[in-house]
Amino acid sequence: MVVYVANEPVVLKSKGYPTDLIRVDDYMTLVSNGLITNEDTIAENPDLVKGMVRAVLNGISEAINDPEEAYRISEKYIEILEWDDYFIQRQVLTESIALWQGPRLGASDPTAWSNMLTVLKGMGLIKRDVDVTKAFTNEFLP
């Protein structure tokens, strides 16, 4: 099955199911989760975009630096954490933090975008070439 590597394998292992992971990133770097806006907002309100990026990166940095506090804060907003298994969900957070590590927090890799285009074209989900350099920007990163 196709899953988020930081979540389902942790849950399956905790329930005694053996897992054999084939990690996409062992073979190819693809685009992952990110923030999305539109060109009008970027042009008309770049300070809003910059502030949003700064706030998200600050939250991620704080979670990396103090995962336990991040978990406690999340319990206030994610109802399932109130009754879900603490040790499983803390491991999910630990696995997620490992994925966030990189040379520049929040930066989008141009190669990942090119690879993603190749994959999506190969699947028939995109029919034509796209200039991937216009699909993302790192200009709002601190």
Image (tube, rainbow, N blue to C red):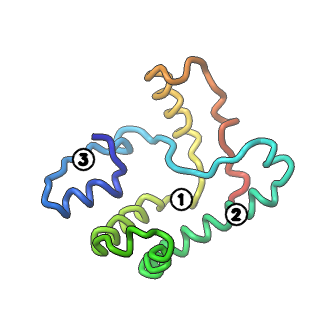
- Between 126 and 142, the one lying in front of the other is 126
* Residue under pointer 2: 142
Amino acid type, mark 2: Pro
Q: Which of marks 2 and 3 is nearer the N terminus?
A: 3
Q: Distance between the residues labelled 1 and 3?
A: 25 Å
Res. 103 mark: 1
Disc 2 is placed on an element classified as loop
Q: Which part of the image, by quadrant, shows the C terminus? A: bottom right
- Relative height, residue 28 to residue 142 (above, below): above
Query: x, y percentage for residue 42?
Result: 79, 48
Disc 1 is placed on an element classified as loop
Left or right of 120 in this view: 34: right
Res. 21 mark: 3
Query: x, y percentage for residue 9?
Result: 26, 55
Q: Earlier in the sequence, mark 2 or mark 1?
A: 1
Q: Earlier in the sequence, mark 1 or mark 3?
A: 3
- Between 57 and 41, the one lying in front of the other is 41
Discs 1, 3 touching: Cβ within 8 Å = no
Amino acid type, mark 1: Pro
